[in-house]
Image (cartoon, coloured by chain):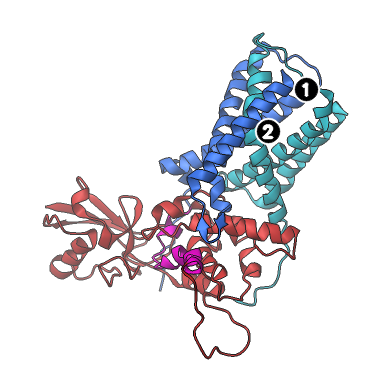
Chain colours: A blue, B cyan, C red
Amino acid sequence: MTYYTPPVDRLWWTRRRSYFVFVLREFTSVGVAWSALLLVYAAKGNEIPVWLVPINLIALAACVFHAITFLSLAPKATVVRLDGWRVPDYMIVGGNYGLWLFASLVLAWVVL
Amino acid sequence: MTTKAKRRTPEPYLWLLFSGGGVIAALVLPVLVLIFGVLAPLGIGDPAFPSWTRWILLIVVFLCLAHAAHRIRFTLAETLRLPHRLLAPVAYGLALAGTVVAVIALV
Amino acid sequence: MTVLEVSRYRPGIDAEPVFQRYEVPDNDDWAVLDGLNYVKDSVDGTLSFRWSCRMGICGSCGMTVNGEPRLTCGTFLADYDGVVRVEPLHGFPVIRDLVVDIEPFLEKLSSVSPWLIRSGEDPASEFAQTPAQLEAYKQYSMCINCMLCYSACPVYVLDPDFLGPAAIALAQRYNLDSRDEGDRFDVLSTDEGVWGCTFVGECTSACPKHVDPAEAIQRYKLTAAVRSVLPWVRL
C-alpha cells in the first residue's frame, strides 16, 4: 500500500487568518526585546532621538498587543478552583487587566 | 511506548523564563515605552529611573529578552523551518549577551 | 443541485489526489456526509470515506470541508454557497480518497496510558466521586478522538511526532481524576509532548465537543514546569 503524504506547506501561516494572527502575536516579542534595550539606553541617561519615535510607536503597539493577548490567555494555564468552584476566565482576565492598569500608574508615578 | 526513556529537557525552565518574562513585559513595558520612547523624545515630560530601580530594571530586561528569545526561536522554527539546534543557542545566546550589555551599562 | 468537489486518491493509480465533481440534490437537512453517501449509493460506488453514527459521537467522519476540519455529519450543505470542497483531514497520510491513516494517532493515545492507574488490589467496591471531583476532568472526557484538533494544529502538521492536542487532553482527563494514581510526566514533559506546543489555540476552535485541548496543554505546562523546579510539589 502506498499512502499519499502531502508535502509540508511552508506558507501555512498565511493560509488562515487565525494562523496569521498567531504569528503576529509571536512576533510582538521583537517589539518586547527592542523596548527592553530602549529602556536600558534611557536608564543610562541618554536622550532618545526624535527619529526613533516611529520605531518606538511600532514597538509600543507590539507591547500593547502582547499585553492584551498574554494577559487574556493566562487563565488557560492557571485554572483556579476554590472549593471545587472554578473561577471563571473573565474574572482572572479582569484581575490581570486591573493589575496592568495599577502597575502602569505606579510606574508612571515612579519615573515621572 | 509506555516505557519511553526518561529524557532531561531544558524546556520547562525555558518556558518558566518565557512566561515570567511575558507577564513582566505585559505589565511594565507599554507604559514605560510610551513615556520614555514616545512622549519624552517629543518633549513631553522628563522621565528618569531613580537609582534604586536599576537592579529591578536589569531583572526586567533579562526576563523580557528571555521571553523574546523563546518566542522568536519557536516562531522561526515554525515559519522558516529552521532547526531548534541552530535557533536555540543563537536566540538564548543573544538574550544573554543583551543582558550582559545591560549590566555593564547600568552597574 | 449542489456540487461536491471531492478529493480522490486511488493508490497505485493516482500519483497524488485529484478532484472529482459530483452533483447532489438540494436537501435542507442534508449534511456533507449525506451528500457523500448519496454519491456512494447512486453515482460512484468507488468513493471511499469513513463514517458510522451520523450524530457526532463516533468521531470517524472528520474531513476537510472548504479548508476547515469538520465532522461531516454535523456540517450542513445548506450552510455553503457554491461548490463544497471535501478533502481528507489535512496533516495525515491518505490511504484512499477521504480515508486517512489513524495508526500513529492511536499509538499516541495509548502512549499516555489513558486509563485509571491504581496501585494495589482491585477494588471490591466502586470509588465514589463528588460532583466537584467529576467536574474537575469531565470536560476533557468528552473527546471523541475525531482528530480534527490535530488537523487544525500547525505544530502537528509540521512535526508528526508531536504528541498533539487530543492525546494530551486525554492524559489530563486522567491526571485530574481523583481516582487516578498514575504519573504521566515522563511522556508529557518532553520536547514532543507539551513543550512542542506554541499555543496557536486552533485545536480548541476546531473541537466539535468543546474539550479545549489548548487549555489542557497550558495547564500541564504549568504543572510540569513547577514540578521541574520544585520536584516535591504536585499541582
Q: Which mark is residue B49?
A: 1
**The C terminus of chain B appears in which quarter of the rendering?**
top right
Asked if the residue under mark 2 is in contact with the one under mark 1, i.e. CB atoms within 8 Å, the reply is: no
In the rendered structure, the residue with mark 1 lies on which chain?
B
Numbered range of the magenta stretch:
C132-153
Which image quadrant is residue C178 in? bottom right
Above-or-below relation of A83 to C181? above
**The N terminus of chain B appears in which quarter of the rendering?**
bottom right
In the rendered structure, the residue with mark 2 lies on which chain?
A
Element under disc 1: loop
Residue closest to the far front = A83
Residue closest to the far top = B43
Q: Which mark is residue B29?
A: none
The amino acid pointed to by label 1 is Phe
Q: Tell me the residue at 77%/31% (across/down).
A: B57
For disc 2, the marked residue is: A33
Q: Tell me the residue at 27%/71% (across/down).
A: C53
